Amino acid sequence: MAIYGNKISPVRTTCVSGWHEHKDGTTSPMNNATGRPLMQAVPTTELTQFAEDVLAGLSTTPKSLSSKYFYDDEGSRLFQEIMKLPEYYLTGCEFDIFSTQTEAIYRAFANGDGKFDLIELGAGDGTKTAVLVDHFLKAGADISYSPIDISQEALDALTEKFNAEFPTLKMSARNGDYFQILDSLRIGDGRRKVLLFLGSNIGNFSREQSVAFFRSLREVMSDDDLLFIGFDLQKDPHVIANAYDDAADVTAKFNLNLLTRINRELGGNFNLGKFTHYANYRPVEGSARSFLVSREKQTVRIDALDREFEFDQWEAVFMEISQKYSLRMIEELASESGFQIKQNFFDSRNYYCDSLWRAIR
Ligand code: AVI
Protein backbone atom coordinates (compact mmCIF):
# COMPACT_ATOMS: atom_id res chain seq x y z
CA MET A 1 0.00 0.00 0.00
CA ALA A 2 1.50 3.31 -1.06
CA ILE A 3 1.37 6.07 1.49
CA TYR A 4 2.49 9.42 0.14
CA GLY A 5 3.98 11.50 2.93
CA ASN A 6 2.59 11.55 6.48
CA LYS A 7 -0.81 9.96 6.78
CA ILE A 8 -3.40 12.19 8.33
CA SER A 9 -6.78 10.68 7.62
CA PRO A 10 -8.29 7.37 6.67
CA VAL A 11 -11.14 9.16 4.90
CA ARG A 12 -11.08 11.02 1.65
CA THR A 13 -13.53 13.50 0.19
CA THR A 14 -15.18 12.89 -3.14
CA CYS A 15 -16.04 14.80 -6.27
CA VAL A 16 -18.46 17.65 -5.51
CA SER A 17 -18.79 21.30 -6.44
CA GLY A 18 -18.23 24.42 -4.34
CA TRP A 19 -16.15 25.11 -1.25
CA HIS A 20 -16.74 25.24 2.45
CA GLU A 21 -14.18 27.33 4.28
CA HIS A 22 -13.39 26.17 7.82
CA LYS A 23 -12.52 28.57 10.63
CA ASP A 24 -8.90 27.43 10.49
CA GLY A 25 -8.63 28.54 6.89
CA THR A 26 -8.75 25.07 5.40
CA THR A 27 -11.40 24.23 2.85
CA SER A 28 -13.54 21.21 2.08
CA PRO A 29 -15.76 20.41 -0.83
CA MET A 30 -19.21 21.79 -0.11
CA ASN A 31 -22.70 20.54 -0.73
CA ASN A 32 -24.10 23.46 -2.69
CA ALA A 33 -27.63 22.82 -1.45
CA THR A 34 -26.83 22.97 2.27
CA GLY A 35 -23.62 25.01 2.29
CA ARG A 36 -22.10 22.37 4.61
CA PRO A 37 -18.91 20.49 4.00
CA LEU A 38 -19.56 17.30 2.13
CA MET A 39 -17.38 14.54 3.48
CA GLN A 40 -18.15 11.16 2.05
CA ALA A 41 -16.21 8.30 3.56
CA VAL A 42 -14.69 6.21 0.82
CA PRO A 43 -12.45 3.31 1.74
CA THR A 44 -9.09 4.34 0.47
CA THR A 45 -5.38 4.52 1.01
CA GLU A 46 -4.65 6.96 3.80
CA LEU A 47 -4.07 10.37 2.28
CA THR A 48 -1.95 13.31 3.31
CA GLN A 49 -3.50 16.75 3.70
CA PHE A 50 -1.73 17.70 0.46
CA ALA A 51 -3.31 14.74 -1.36
CA GLU A 52 -6.74 15.55 0.09
CA ASP A 53 -6.50 19.18 -0.97
CA VAL A 54 -5.34 18.26 -4.48
CA LEU A 55 -8.22 15.80 -4.78
CA ALA A 56 -10.74 18.36 -3.60
CA GLY A 57 -9.31 21.13 -5.78
CA LEU A 58 -9.22 19.10 -8.99
CA SER A 59 -12.67 17.65 -8.35
CA THR A 60 -14.48 20.99 -8.30
CA THR A 61 -15.55 23.30 -11.08
CA PRO A 62 -13.67 25.54 -11.58
CA LYS A 63 -10.60 23.51 -10.66
CA SER A 64 -8.16 24.97 -8.17
CA LEU A 65 -4.90 24.14 -6.41
CA SER A 66 -3.84 25.86 -3.22
CA SER A 67 -0.90 28.26 -3.43
CA LYS A 68 0.09 27.26 0.09
CA TYR A 69 1.68 24.18 -1.54
CA PHE A 70 3.94 26.29 -3.79
CA TYR A 71 6.69 26.29 -1.18
CA ASP A 72 8.61 23.05 -1.42
CA ASP A 73 12.35 23.67 -1.59
CA GLU A 74 12.28 24.39 -5.34
CA GLY A 75 9.21 26.64 -4.94
CA SER A 76 10.95 28.56 -2.16
CA ARG A 77 14.02 28.94 -4.36
CA LEU A 78 11.89 30.21 -7.26
CA PHE A 79 10.18 32.67 -4.94
CA GLN A 80 13.61 34.03 -3.91
CA GLU A 81 14.21 34.54 -7.65
CA ILE A 82 10.84 36.30 -8.06
CA MET A 83 11.79 38.72 -5.30
CA LYS A 84 14.79 39.84 -7.37
CA LEU A 85 12.78 40.44 -10.57
CA PRO A 86 12.48 44.03 -11.81
CA GLU A 87 8.69 43.65 -12.13
CA TYR A 88 8.22 42.33 -8.59
CA TYR A 89 8.31 45.64 -6.72
CA LEU A 90 6.96 44.36 -3.36
CA THR A 91 10.28 43.26 -1.85
CA GLY A 92 12.04 46.49 -2.81
CA CYS A 93 9.24 48.54 -1.24
CA GLU A 94 9.47 46.72 2.07
CA PHE A 95 13.24 47.00 1.93
CA ASP A 96 12.87 50.75 1.33
CA ILE A 97 10.63 51.06 4.43
CA PHE A 98 12.99 49.01 6.59
CA SER A 99 16.11 50.86 5.49
CA THR A 100 14.78 54.41 5.63
CA GLN A 101 12.53 54.17 8.71
CA THR A 102 14.52 51.78 10.87
CA GLU A 103 14.75 54.04 13.90
CA ALA A 104 11.02 54.89 13.83
CA ILE A 105 10.23 51.16 13.58
CA TYR A 106 12.60 50.44 16.47
CA ARG A 107 10.95 53.07 18.67
CA ALA A 108 7.52 51.68 17.87
CA PHE A 109 8.61 48.07 18.65
CA ALA A 110 10.71 48.97 21.69
CA ASN A 111 7.82 50.45 23.67
CA GLY A 112 10.25 52.26 25.92
CA ASP A 113 12.31 49.32 27.22
CA GLY A 114 13.89 47.78 24.08
CA LYS A 115 13.23 44.23 25.32
CA PHE A 116 11.22 42.02 23.00
CA ASP A 117 11.17 38.72 21.12
CA LEU A 118 10.84 38.95 17.36
CA ILE A 119 8.89 36.06 15.85
CA GLU A 120 8.71 35.98 12.07
CA LEU A 121 5.98 33.91 10.41
CA GLY A 122 7.06 32.76 6.94
CA ALA A 123 10.58 34.19 7.29
CA GLY A 124 12.01 32.93 3.98
CA ASP A 125 15.66 34.01 3.74
CA GLY A 126 15.17 36.83 6.27
CA THR A 127 17.08 39.38 4.15
CA LYS A 128 14.76 42.29 4.95
CA THR A 129 14.49 41.39 8.62
CA ALA A 130 18.31 41.44 8.86
CA VAL A 131 18.16 45.21 8.26
CA LEU A 132 15.93 45.62 11.32
CA VAL A 133 17.85 43.18 13.51
CA ASP A 134 21.13 44.92 12.68
CA HIS A 135 19.72 48.29 13.75
CA PHE A 136 18.03 46.91 16.89
CA LEU A 137 21.26 45.28 18.07
CA LYS A 138 23.30 48.41 17.38
CA ALA A 139 20.72 50.40 19.37
CA GLY A 140 21.41 48.07 22.33
CA ALA A 141 18.07 46.25 22.22
CA ASP A 142 17.65 43.04 24.22
CA ILE A 143 16.03 40.87 21.55
CA SER A 144 15.72 37.31 20.36
CA TYR A 145 14.69 36.21 16.88
CA SER A 146 12.55 33.14 16.00
CA PRO A 147 12.05 32.66 12.27
CA ILE A 148 9.35 30.15 11.27
CA ASP A 149 9.17 28.76 7.76
CA ILE A 150 7.80 25.77 5.89
CA SER A 151 11.06 25.35 3.95
CA GLN A 152 13.94 23.80 5.91
CA GLU A 153 16.32 24.83 3.11
CA ALA A 154 15.32 28.50 3.45
CA LEU A 155 15.67 28.28 7.25
CA ASP A 156 19.13 26.71 7.00
CA ALA A 157 20.29 29.53 4.71
CA LEU A 158 18.79 32.12 7.06
CA THR A 159 20.38 30.57 10.15
CA GLU A 160 23.80 30.44 8.53
CA LYS A 161 23.53 34.06 7.39
CA PHE A 162 22.28 35.36 10.76
CA ASN A 163 24.85 33.37 12.76
CA ALA A 164 27.61 34.90 10.68
CA GLU A 165 26.21 38.44 10.76
CA PHE A 166 24.90 38.52 14.33
CA PRO A 167 26.93 36.07 16.42
CA THR A 168 25.44 37.37 19.71
CA LEU A 169 21.79 37.17 18.64
CA LYS A 170 19.64 34.61 20.49
CA MET A 171 17.96 32.66 17.72
CA SER A 172 15.70 29.63 17.44
CA ALA A 173 14.49 28.72 13.95
CA ARG A 174 11.39 26.55 13.62
CA ASN A 175 10.39 24.53 10.61
CA GLY A 176 6.68 24.13 9.94
CA ASP A 177 3.39 25.59 8.92
CA TYR A 178 2.66 28.69 11.00
CA PHE A 179 -0.88 27.49 11.62
CA GLN A 180 0.57 24.45 13.40
CA ILE A 181 3.11 26.49 15.31
CA LEU A 182 0.58 29.08 16.52
CA ASP A 183 -0.18 27.25 19.72
CA SER A 184 3.45 27.10 20.78
CA LEU A 185 3.52 30.93 20.58
CA ARG A 186 1.09 31.05 23.49
CA ILE A 187 3.80 29.79 25.82
CA GLY A 188 5.85 32.86 26.65
CA ASP A 189 8.33 33.72 29.33
CA GLY A 190 6.61 37.01 30.02
CA ARG A 191 8.70 38.94 27.52
CA ARG A 192 6.91 41.06 24.97
CA LYS A 193 6.48 39.50 21.51
CA VAL A 194 6.54 41.33 18.21
CA LEU A 195 5.11 39.08 15.51
CA LEU A 196 6.22 39.77 11.95
CA PHE A 197 4.12 38.75 8.97
CA LEU A 198 5.89 40.47 6.09
CA GLY A 199 6.03 40.39 2.32
CA SER A 200 2.24 40.82 1.86
CA ASN A 201 1.90 37.09 2.57
CA ILE A 202 -1.53 37.95 3.92
CA GLY A 203 -2.55 38.78 0.32
CA ASN A 204 -2.56 35.06 -0.48
CA PHE A 205 -5.41 34.47 1.98
CA SER A 206 -9.07 35.09 1.28
CA ARG A 207 -10.65 37.81 3.41
CA GLU A 208 -12.31 35.24 5.68
CA GLN A 209 -9.03 33.36 6.08
CA SER A 210 -7.25 36.63 6.88
CA VAL A 211 -9.67 37.56 9.66
CA ALA A 212 -9.55 34.00 11.06
CA PHE A 213 -5.76 34.04 10.94
CA PHE A 214 -5.43 37.44 12.66
CA ARG A 215 -7.97 36.38 15.29
CA SER A 216 -6.00 33.23 16.02
CA LEU A 217 -2.86 35.35 16.38
CA ARG A 218 -4.76 37.67 18.73
CA GLU A 219 -5.63 34.65 20.88
CA VAL A 220 -2.00 33.73 21.45
CA MET A 221 -0.87 37.33 21.97
CA SER A 222 -0.66 39.15 25.28
CA ASP A 223 -2.07 42.65 25.52
CA ASP A 224 1.35 44.29 25.12
CA ASP A 225 2.46 42.21 22.14
CA LEU A 226 2.53 43.73 18.68
CA LEU A 227 1.83 42.46 15.18
CA PHE A 228 3.70 43.97 12.18
CA ILE A 229 2.17 43.13 8.80
CA GLY A 230 3.22 43.90 5.23
CA PHE A 231 0.36 44.94 2.91
CA ASP A 232 0.77 45.58 -0.80
CA LEU A 233 -1.37 48.62 -1.63
CA GLN A 234 -3.66 49.22 -4.62
CA LYS A 235 -1.87 51.16 -7.34
CA ASP A 236 -1.57 51.46 -11.15
CA PRO A 237 -3.10 48.17 -12.37
CA HIS A 238 -0.39 47.78 -15.02
CA VAL A 239 2.33 47.77 -12.37
CA ILE A 240 0.50 45.03 -10.45
CA ALA A 241 -0.35 42.94 -13.54
CA ASN A 242 3.32 42.96 -14.63
CA ALA A 243 4.50 41.83 -11.20
CA TYR A 244 2.61 38.55 -11.70
CA ASP A 245 3.53 38.06 -15.36
CA ASP A 246 7.26 38.71 -15.56
CA ALA A 247 9.17 38.75 -18.83
CA ALA A 248 11.58 36.00 -17.68
CA ASP A 249 8.67 33.64 -16.89
CA VAL A 250 9.89 32.92 -13.37
CA THR A 251 6.34 33.34 -12.01
CA ALA A 252 5.15 30.83 -14.62
CA LYS A 253 7.79 28.34 -13.42
CA PHE A 254 6.78 29.04 -9.82
CA ASN A 255 3.17 28.06 -10.60
CA LEU A 256 4.11 25.09 -12.77
CA ASN A 257 6.39 23.79 -10.01
CA LEU A 258 3.27 22.77 -8.07
CA LEU A 259 2.48 20.30 -10.88
CA THR A 260 6.03 18.95 -10.58
CA ARG A 261 5.46 18.58 -6.84
CA ILE A 262 2.23 16.65 -7.45
CA ASN A 263 4.07 14.41 -9.94
CA ARG A 264 6.85 13.72 -7.45
CA GLU A 265 4.94 13.45 -4.17
CA LEU A 266 1.62 12.06 -5.36
CA GLY A 267 2.67 10.07 -8.41
CA GLY A 268 1.03 12.42 -10.93
CA ASN A 269 1.75 12.47 -14.65
CA PHE A 270 1.21 16.16 -15.42
CA ASN A 271 3.01 17.20 -18.61
CA LEU A 272 4.07 20.76 -17.78
CA GLY A 273 4.35 21.71 -21.46
CA LYS A 274 0.60 21.19 -21.80
CA PHE A 275 -0.20 24.03 -19.36
CA THR A 276 0.36 27.76 -19.65
CA HIS A 277 0.51 30.34 -16.88
CA TYR A 278 -1.99 33.22 -17.01
CA ALA A 279 -2.27 36.08 -14.52
CA ASN A 280 -4.62 39.05 -14.32
CA TYR A 281 -5.43 41.92 -11.98
CA ARG A 282 -8.98 43.03 -11.20
CA PRO A 283 -8.83 46.65 -10.07
CA VAL A 284 -12.41 46.69 -8.74
CA GLU A 285 -11.68 43.96 -6.18
CA GLY A 286 -7.97 44.84 -5.91
CA SER A 287 -6.94 41.25 -6.53
CA ALA A 288 -4.32 39.67 -8.76
CA ARG A 289 -5.09 36.06 -9.71
CA SER A 290 -3.03 33.41 -11.39
CA PHE A 291 -4.10 30.33 -13.29
CA LEU A 292 -2.61 27.37 -15.11
CA VAL A 293 -4.55 26.85 -18.32
CA SER A 294 -4.69 23.52 -20.13
CA ARG A 295 -3.46 24.03 -23.69
CA GLU A 296 -5.36 20.96 -24.90
CA LYS A 297 -7.97 18.41 -23.89
CA GLN A 298 -6.12 15.94 -21.72
CA THR A 299 -6.33 13.39 -18.93
CA VAL A 300 -3.98 13.46 -15.95
CA ARG A 301 -3.54 10.53 -13.61
CA ILE A 302 -2.55 10.87 -9.96
CA ASP A 303 -1.57 7.49 -8.51
CA ALA A 304 -1.85 8.47 -4.84
CA LEU A 305 -5.48 9.41 -5.43
CA ASP A 306 -6.10 6.48 -7.74
CA ARG A 307 -7.89 8.96 -9.96
CA GLU A 308 -7.80 10.47 -13.42
CA PHE A 309 -8.76 14.08 -14.03
CA GLU A 310 -10.09 15.42 -17.32
CA PHE A 311 -9.05 18.86 -18.53
CA ASP A 312 -10.87 20.58 -21.40
CA GLN A 313 -8.89 22.60 -23.87
CA TRP A 314 -8.33 26.07 -22.30
CA GLU A 315 -9.76 24.97 -18.97
CA ALA A 316 -8.21 27.09 -16.19
CA VAL A 317 -6.99 25.89 -12.81
CA PHE A 318 -7.12 28.71 -10.27
CA MET A 319 -3.78 28.81 -8.43
CA GLU A 320 -3.36 31.95 -6.36
CA ILE A 321 -4.91 35.20 -5.21
CA SER A 322 -2.66 38.14 -4.32
CA GLN A 323 -4.88 40.76 -2.71
CA LYS A 324 -3.95 44.45 -2.89
CA TYR A 325 -5.25 46.75 -0.16
CA SER A 326 -6.62 50.22 0.44
CA LEU A 327 -5.99 51.83 3.83
CA ARG A 328 -9.67 51.42 4.63
CA MET A 329 -9.39 47.66 4.01
CA ILE A 330 -6.41 47.48 6.39
CA GLU A 331 -8.32 49.38 9.11
CA GLU A 332 -11.35 47.13 8.70
CA LEU A 333 -9.24 43.98 8.85
CA ALA A 334 -7.58 45.20 12.05
CA SER A 335 -10.79 46.10 13.84
CA GLU A 336 -12.63 42.94 12.75
CA SER A 337 -9.75 40.84 14.08
CA GLY A 338 -9.45 42.51 17.49
CA PHE A 339 -6.63 44.98 16.74
CA GLN A 340 -6.10 48.68 16.20
CA ILE A 341 -3.42 50.32 14.09
CA LYS A 342 -0.58 51.72 16.19
CA GLN A 343 1.41 53.11 13.27
CA ASN A 344 1.65 52.72 9.48
CA PHE A 345 4.94 52.91 7.56
CA PHE A 346 4.94 53.62 3.80
CA ASP A 347 7.62 53.43 1.12
CA SER A 348 8.55 56.53 -0.88
CA ARG A 349 6.10 55.70 -3.72
CA ASN A 350 3.21 54.76 -1.42
CA TYR A 351 3.10 51.35 -3.08
CA TYR A 352 3.29 49.39 0.14
CA CYS A 353 2.45 49.67 3.82
CA ASP A 354 3.91 47.93 6.86
CA SER A 355 1.21 48.27 9.47
CA LEU A 356 1.91 47.87 13.18
CA TRP A 357 -1.07 46.62 15.16
CA ARG A 358 -1.72 46.46 18.87
CA ALA A 359 -4.36 44.27 20.38
CA ILE A 360 -7.61 45.86 21.51
CA ARG A 361 -7.81 44.97 25.20
C1 AVI B 1 4.27 35.18 -1.10
N1 AVI B 1 3.34 36.07 -1.80
C2 AVI B 1 3.13 37.31 -1.03
C3 AVI B 1 3.64 36.32 -3.19
C4 AVI B 1 2.61 37.29 -3.80
O1 AVI B 1 3.03 38.34 -4.26
O2 AVI B 1 1.42 36.99 -3.76
C5 AVI B 1 3.65 35.03 -3.99
C6 AVI B 1 3.85 35.26 -5.44
N2 AVI B 1 3.11 34.77 -6.39
C7 AVI B 1 3.56 35.16 -7.56
N3 AVI B 1 4.58 35.95 -7.37
C8 AVI B 1 4.82 36.02 -6.05
Image: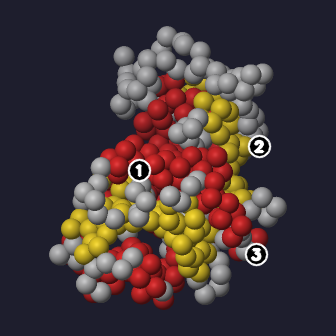
Q: Amino acid at mark 3?
A: Asp
- The answer to whether one can see residue 240 in this image is no
Amino acid type shown at disc 1: Val
Q: Image point 40% across, 81% down: which residue?
A: 106
Q: Secondary structure at mark 3?
A: loop
Q: Is residue 78 above or below residue 99?
A: above
Q: Which residue is mark 2?
A: 314
- Circle nearer the viewer, 3 or 2: 3
Quarter-wise, where is residue 123 in the image? bottom left
Secondary structure under the numbered disc 1 in the rendered image: helix
The location of residue 64, given as percent across then percent down, is 65, 40
Looking at the image, what colour scheme do you see? secondary structure
Residue 116 appears in the rendering:
yes
Q: Label 2: how many residues lie within 10 Å, few (<14), some (14-19) or many (20+)?
A: some
Please name the residue shown 74% across and 62% down the image: 286
Does residue 91 appear to the left or right of 321 in the view shown? Answer: left
- Write down the residue under mark 1: 220
Marks 1,3: beta carbons within 8 A: no
Residue 308 in percent (x, y) is at 60, 24
Q: CA distance from mark 1 to mark 2?
A: 45 Å
- Which residue is label 3 attached to? 236
CA gap, disc 1 to disc 3? 37 Å
Chain-order first, disc 1 or disc 2: 1
In this rendered view, identify the residue nearer to me: 301 or 82.
82
Tell which of 127 and 178 is nearer to you.
Answer: 178
Other-residue count near label 3 (Cα within 10 Å), few / some / many at <14 / 14–19 / ≥20: few
Residue 192: image tag: none
